[in-house]
Image (tube, rainbow, N blue to C red):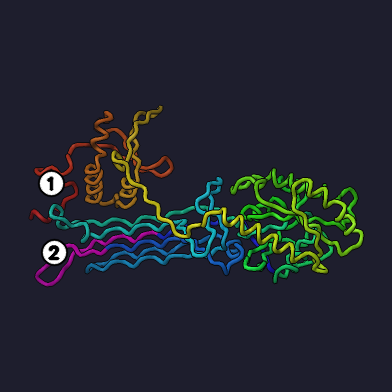
Amino acid sequence: MTTFVDRVVLHVSGGDGGHGCMSVHREKFKPLGGPDGGNGGHGGDVRLTVDTNVTSLLEFHHGPHRRAGNGRPGEGNYRNGGNGQEIVLRVPPGTVVMTPGGEVLADLVSHGMEAVIAKGGHGGLGNAALASTRRKAPGFALLGEPGETHDVVLELKSVADVALVGFPSAGKSSLIAAISSARPKIADYPFTTLVPNLGVVTAGATVFTVADVPGLIPGASEGKGLGLQFLRHVERCHVLAHVLDCATLDPGRDPVSDLEAIEYELQQYGGTEGDLSDRPRLVVLNKVDVPEARDLAELVKPVLEDLGYSVYIVSAVSHEGLRELGFALGEMVKTARAATPLVETRRIIITPKAVDDAGFTVTREEDSEGVRYRVRGERPQRWVRQTDFSNDEAVGYLADRLARLGVEDKLLELGAVAGVDVVIGPEDNAVLFGWEPTIAAGTPLAGPRGSDDRLFQ
């Protein structure tokens, strides 16, 4: 049995970066031939890409956990580790990527669009890459950075030009089968259509797509029936076609009241694409192959035209009026396309860095436990993650980097004194230091923190 899934929660993790290698070249008569540790490989990314051959999110419903490959660690003799395997997840056009809180991260609407939703960690540098004229034989290497881990919501919104909306059993599935090559399930009971069906219609030189949206009922915008689940598939459509059942036997229903009920639900639904009330629309009076239905259609047509609607009397069974309807929809689609700017499939956004952006911030925090200073910033936090705190030389190298970045100067400016607690990172993932500014970074007499005593023997 085919299952249609248009909303999933995906748990993704980028690959961890490989650790750098600490190695010293050795050969006969040359016990300390210099550092030759290679760099660790980068972790793989988790990437989404739009593929028109994919029609639902079913694959991620059955497998919501995805993790990219880890980078390989570096090795001696200058051998760098390989990069981790990237994971490419194929999604259908119209997929919206959001945070669990509803913030839109990416809107993937056309073939080939891509978005990285979990970046892999950077590989750590080996001691060969860390060597310099001031630190000729580093006795440490940097650790690989862990990959990003996120929970994201994928929500599919059908990309179609025309949406057929109406009550259950109004004949929408029969209509899309009559005007296109789509073959949806058709039966004589309500809610036969459980998934949106797409069909391609040719009207002269205009080719457009039509979506058969599952039936709506009063209260659909509040979650009754299947409406709220599938109203999102109406959001991207340029034109709305109200399909009204003129042969219904339900007491208390007629085409005019059905139209008013569906219009109310469309107005109440607030989607991310904006209000649906401004979409061009027309009315289709269906099932006029039934004699009583034809009489009713001819009776209500002037009423609906007085309300400002273009009305078409059709029969999906006898195909009466379908040609006129197809050309009318084609003209409306052509007008809507002309008024809609083309979607760019590739876009490069360049955000210049502010002139006074130091790349980090230092804030003073005070509570019942005392005073501490918190350092935030992409580079300081990445450097901390890559530091092996069991190696004193690596810790000294971290202190040098922070000092060159200006962290110590900023701490002194804010009134920090020796012994005060300094926290690097956010509240949920931070490293605590007892600050001791006893050695200035780069002082010629003292040498850099973390230097190797073997060089002076």
> Which label was assigned to residue 172?
none
Stretch of the chain drawn in magenta = 16-38
Look at the numbered disc 2 and give the secondary structure of its residue: loop
Task: Pick the quarter of the image with the C terminus.
Answer: bottom left
* Residue linked to disc 1: 447
Instruction: Decide which of 97, 16 is in the foreground and name it.
Output: 97
Q: Is residue 388 magenta?
A: no
Nearer the N terminus, badge 2 or badge 1?
2
The quarter holding residue 264 reads: top right
As drawn, is 83 to the left or to the right of 238?
left
Task: Pick the quarter of the image with the N terminus.
Answer: bottom right
For the question of whether residue 169 can be seen, the reply is no
* Residue linked to disc 2: 32
For the question of whether residue 128 can be seen, the reply is yes
Q: In the displayed image of the protein, which residue is found farthest to the left?
A: 457
Label 2 to label 1: alpha-carbon separation: 21 Å
Q: Which residue sits at x=34%, y=43%?
A: 377
> Horizontal and vertical percent for residue 306?
79, 46
Q: Which residue sits at x=85%, y=56%?
A: 246
Which numbered disc, 2 or 1, marks the residue closer to the eye? Answer: 1
Rendered position, 252 above or below 293: above
The quarter holding residue 120 reads: bottom left
Q: Is residue 30 magenta?
A: yes
Q: Residues within 10 Å of mark 1 (few under 14, many from 20)?
A: some
Residue contact between numbered discs 2 and 1, judged by CB atoms under 8 Å: no
Give the residue type at disc 1: Gly
Give the residue type at disc 2: Leu
> Horizontal and vertical percent for residue 94?
57, 58
